[in-house]
C-alpha cells in the first residue's frame, strides 16, 4: 500500500484526485493522511467527497474514511467499470474536478463510457468548462485519448445546477506531444477570440466586457461570442479569452462577482493574457498541471511553460509514487521552464 501525506507540497485536493485516479489505473491501494492540511478548512469537503465516491463507483473500490471533514482515508481499488455513470455534486462544487479524478482510468478502458455530471461548471479555483473543452481536450485527442464534451447548461458559483456530458472512447495512442509555440501563435490577433457567459444579468454586462477585450487586443466583433446560458439556475458571468488554434490553445478566465464591475473582470483577463504572451511560453500554469497525468499515461512528451506552481510540482510527486516514470521540471534559461514526461504506454 502506498502511503501519502496530504500536507506535502501545496497540501490541497489535487493530491487526493491524482491518487484516486492512479490507484484505479495501477490497481495499487493507498492511504492518505493529513488531507488538505494546508487549507483553512482541512479534510474532505463536499466536492472532494464527491470525487472519492465517483472513483469508488467506477473503480469498484473499498473505502475507509469517506466522510465530510475526514482527514485520513484508505482506498482499495477493484475492477474498473466503464459505461454510463451520472454523478451529482449536490452543491455548486466543481464537476470538472470530479471529471479530473475519473477521466484518466476511463480513458484507458477497453469499452466506451458516458459521464454526466451535475453541479458547478464555471467555478473559481477550478478549471471551468470552456477551458476543458477548448484547451485541455484537444491536447488529449492529440495524445490519442478520445474524449468529447457537451455543456447542457452552465452552473455558476454559488447556485450550481450545471450539467455536462462527456463521451470517452477506447484510447488509440497518438504522437508524443511537443509544445513549443512559434511567436505567431501567441502574437497574431487572428489567434485570439473571446467568449462571455451570462446568466440572469443584463446584456449590457457582456457589452461592456467585450468592449474592454476588443480595446485590449484589437479583435473584431466576429471574434467575440456570447453564451446566454439558457437553463442555468442562478445568476453568473464569466469572461474567457482563447489564445491559439483548434488543435492547441490556451484559455484564460475572469469570474464575475457581486460588487465587481464588469470592466474590471474583463480587464483582469486581458492583463492575464498579455502577461502570458510576454513569457513566450505556449503553456500556462493551469494547463501545465492538467497535462502531467495524461502525458504520463500516454506516450509522454514535453512542453515549455511559465514557472510551475506548487500545485504542478506536487502533482508530479504524486504521479511518481504510483508510476515508474520520469518527470523533469527544469528552467530553460529564458524565464521559462521545460517539463518533460516519460510516457507509460506506447503504440
Image (cartoon, rainbow, N blue to C red):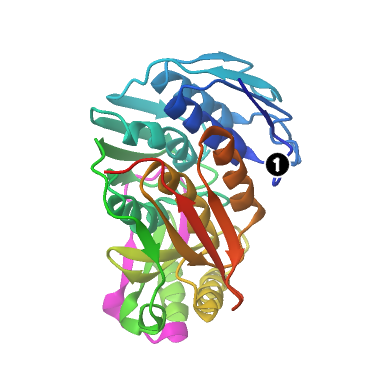
Dot 1 crowding, Cα within 10 Å, few <14, some 14–19, many 20+: many
Q: Quadrant of the C terminus?
A: top left
Residue 151, position as x, y percentages in the image: 31, 46
Q: Is residue 217 magenta?
A: yes
Judged left or right of residue 310, residue 163 is left
Seen at 43% across and 64% down, the residue is 251
Residue 148, position as x, y percentages in the image: 26, 45
Question: Can you see residue 90?
Answer: no
Q: Is residue 69 above or below residue 274?
A: above
Quadrant of the image occupied by residue 54: top left
Q: Is residue 271 above or below residue 91?
A: below
Quadrant of the image occupied by residue 9: top right
Question: Can you see residue 340?
Answer: yes
Residue 46, position as x, y percentages in the image: 58, 30
Quadrant of the image occupied by residue 178: bottom left
Secondary structure under badge 1? loop
Judged left or right of residue 346, residue 89 is right
In terms of depth relative to the viewer, which is nearer, 70 or 77?
77
Seen at 55% across and 20% down, the residue is 29
In terms of depth relative to the viewer, which is nearer, 57 or 346?
346
Q: Quadrant of the N terminus?
A: top right
Q: Is residue 205 magenta?
A: no
Residue where numbered disc 1 is placed: 11
In the image, the segment drawn in magenta is 215-238
Q: Is residue 320 above or below residue 310?
A: above
Amino acid at each position: 500500500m502506498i502511503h501519502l501525506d496530504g500536507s506535502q507540497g501545496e497540501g490541497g485536493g489535487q493530491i487526493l484526485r491524482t491518487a484516486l485516479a492512479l490507484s484505479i489505473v495501477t490497481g495499487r491501494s493507498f492511504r492518505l493522511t493529513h488531507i488538505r492540511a494546508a487549507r483553512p478548512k482541512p479534510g474532505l469537503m463536499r466536492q472532494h467527497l464527491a470525487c472519492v465516491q465517483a472513483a469508488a463507483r467506477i473503480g469498484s473500490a473499498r473505502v475507509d474514511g469517506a466522510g465530510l471533514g475526514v482527514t485520513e482515508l484508505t482506498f482499495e481499488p477493484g475492477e474498473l467499470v466503464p459505461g454510463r455513470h451520472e454523478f451529482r455534486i449536490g452543491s455548486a462544487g466543481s464537476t470538472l474536478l470530479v471529471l479530473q479524478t475519473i477521466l484518466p482510468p476511463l480513458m484507458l478502458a477497453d469499452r466506451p463510457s458516458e459521464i454526466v455530471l451535475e453541479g458547478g461548471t464555471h467555478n473559481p479555483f477550478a478549471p471551468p468548462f470552456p477551458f476543458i473543452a477548448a484547451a485541455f481536450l484537444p491536447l488529449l485527442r492529440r495524445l490519442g485519448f478520445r474524449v468529447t464534451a457537451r455543456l447542457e447548461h452552465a452552473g455558476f458559483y454559488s447556485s450550481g445546477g450545471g450539467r455536462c456530458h462527456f463521451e470517452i472512447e477506447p484510447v488509440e495512442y497518438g504522437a508524443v506531444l511537443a509544445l513549443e509555440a512559434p511567436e505567431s501563435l501567441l502574437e497574431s490577433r487572428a489567434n485570439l477570440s473571446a467568449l462571455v457567459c451570462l446568466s440572469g444579468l443584463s446584456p449590457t454586462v457582456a457589452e461592456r466586457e467585450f468592449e474592454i477585450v476588443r480595446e485590449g487586443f484589437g479583435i473584431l466583433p466576429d471574434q467575440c461570442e456570447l453564451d446566454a446560458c439558457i437553463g442555468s439556475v442562478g445568476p453568473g458571468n464569466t469572461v474567457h479569452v482563447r489564445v491559439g488554434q483548434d488543435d492547441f490553445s490556451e484559455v484564460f478566465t475572469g469570474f464575475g462577482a457581486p460588487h465587481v464591475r464588469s470592466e474590471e473582470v474583463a480587464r483582469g483577463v486581458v492583463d492575464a493574457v498579455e502577461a502570458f504572451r510576454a513569457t513566450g511560453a505556449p503553456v500556462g500554469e493551469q494547463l501545465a498541471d492538467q497535462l502531467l497525468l495524461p502525458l504520463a499515461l500516454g506516450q509522454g512528451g514535453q512542453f515549455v511553460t511559465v514557472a510551475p506552481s506548487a500545485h504542478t510540482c506536487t502533482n508530479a510527486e504524486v504521479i511518481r509514487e504510483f508510476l515508474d516514470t520520469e518527470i523533469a521540471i527544469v528552467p530553460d534559461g529564458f524565464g521559462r521552464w521545460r517539463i518533460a514526461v516519460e510516457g507509460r504506454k506506447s503504440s
